[in-house]
Image (cartoon, rainbow, N blue to C red):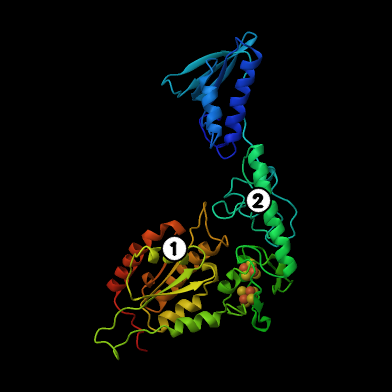
Amino acid sequence: PGQGNDQDFPYASSVTSLVALKQAGYVREDYADGKAFVIYQHMRTPGLTENFYKTVQQDPGIFLTKGQVVQVSKNGAGLIVNADDTLLGQPIQIKADMVVLATGMVPATKDDPVINLAYRQGPGFRDNAIFNDYADSNYICFPYETQRTGIYAAGGIRRSMTTEESVEDAAGAALKAIQCLESVNRGVSVHPRSGDLTFPDFFFQRCTQCKRCTQECPFGALDDDERGTPKTNPTRCRRCGTCMGACPERIINFANYSIDSVSSMVKAIKVPSTDDFDEPPLRVLGLICENDAYPALDIAALNRLSWNADVRFIPVRCLGSVNVIWIKDALSKGMDGVFLMGCKHGDDYQCHFVKGSELAEIRVKKIGEALSSLALEPERVAHFEVAIDEYDKIPQMLQEFMGTIEGLGPNPFKGF
Ligand code: SF4
Ligand code: SF4
């Protein structure tokens, strides 16, 4: 409920609806002649609770309508409730003995986000504003997981929930916590790179203390000392590689995933030239996030969808791990275009490492400016987002990008 606004929508969930229905039922149980009116903005009764809603609807003493309560005023010893925009199509006025305002469940972190975590990025959960001040959580892919490794949010701190939902949620979070402890004891990474044994390795002699890695690490795994040199927190690290993608000095690498290893893959891709063709075909590189985009490509292929044969793909750990040097390597080798394909970002982000896709988009925009200064068209580099179930959109995306590159013509650096 709210007066002409819906600000409490995120907080007034099925809990609010179900409690209102239950209380209406109590009134009827205690007073055989009693009447209960429920005026709601949103009636949310998911799953089997819809049956409860239907049962309440059958009670002749309970009146339910969507509407906006515009006024509650005194009427002698009782009250008068006025409501507009009702399902009846006209305002209603109800004489009542008692009015109950059903409120939502507002998380404690709305008033005070501080939960005293010792992180350089602040003592609270991150990105609370995106989540209506609930604890951060990858709602789409990994409920419970926060951006603070080892802290799993469950129940009312994550979203408005019924007791039953909270119990189920807590069981899921507890299992995640057990997995986390077992992984840390074995010295391996927690989800989503479960079992990964490597850590980012810093060649500190060449560190310029620019702090990009410490600022961009989504999991706060990097602190810095008084000079700005990163200090690693291995147990917080999820091995996403975002620090590797961020570092302008390219001094962060993993034993099994490095600037050099991907650069070598880029350089190993053959670019057709006039030595072999009268009119060499285009060559376009796709750096593909291995979490959603690469499986989506797989599904597209299994469904026999096809795309331009001039595209080559290299899987990456996360788009956040893409270092712009790989894009420069590809273009300086004469490739005609480069695109990054990863998970969706924004409010309903699906990025497995939270920030990777978003950071990649920012970096692509920046590289566009650098390309302009080299007289290369910024349109040669693009960023696409796909959900894993959007595999059928991939051929169209690639076709449109290839159309753009064909319109631009071959990379002028080809052959140099
Ligand atoms: S790999 Fe990811 S989690 Fe680990 S330090 Fe780098 S950015 Fe942070
Ligand atoms: S991004 Fe690279 S150069 Fe900058 S602080 Fe981190 S390690 Fe040092």
Distance Cα–Cα, label 2 vs label 1: 27 Å
Residue drawn at x 58%, y 25% is: 21
Out of 165 and 161, give the one closest to the viewer: 165
Give the quadrant of the N terminus.
Answer: top right
Nearer to us in this view, 155 or 300: 300
How far across and down, in percent of the image, does residue 403 sit?
29, 69
Quadrant of the snapshot with the C terminus: bottom left
Q: Residue 272 appears at what percent x and percent y? A: 33, 84
Q: Is residue 407 left or right of residue 199?
A: left
Residue indicated by mark 2: 172
Q: Are marks 2 and 1 in contact (CB under 8 Å)?
A: no
- Identify the amino acid type marked 2: Gly
Dot 2 crowding, Cα within 10 Å, few <14, some 14–19, many 20+: some
Q: Earlier in the sequence, mark 2 or mark 1?
A: 2
Residue 407: give x, y in percent of width and height. 27, 71
Q: Whereabouts is ligand 1, in terms of quadrant? A: bottom right
Find numbered disc 1 in the image and state the secondary structure of the residue it sits on: helix
The residue nearer to you, when weighing 85 against 352, is: 352
**Amino acid found under the numbered disc labelled 1:** Ala
The residue pinned by badge 1 equals 296
Residue displayed at 54% across by 82% down: 261
Establish whether ligand 1 lies closer than 8 Å to the Cβ of label 1.
no
Can residue 387 be seen in the rendering of this structure?
A: no
- Where is residue 303? Give x, y as percent: 37, 62
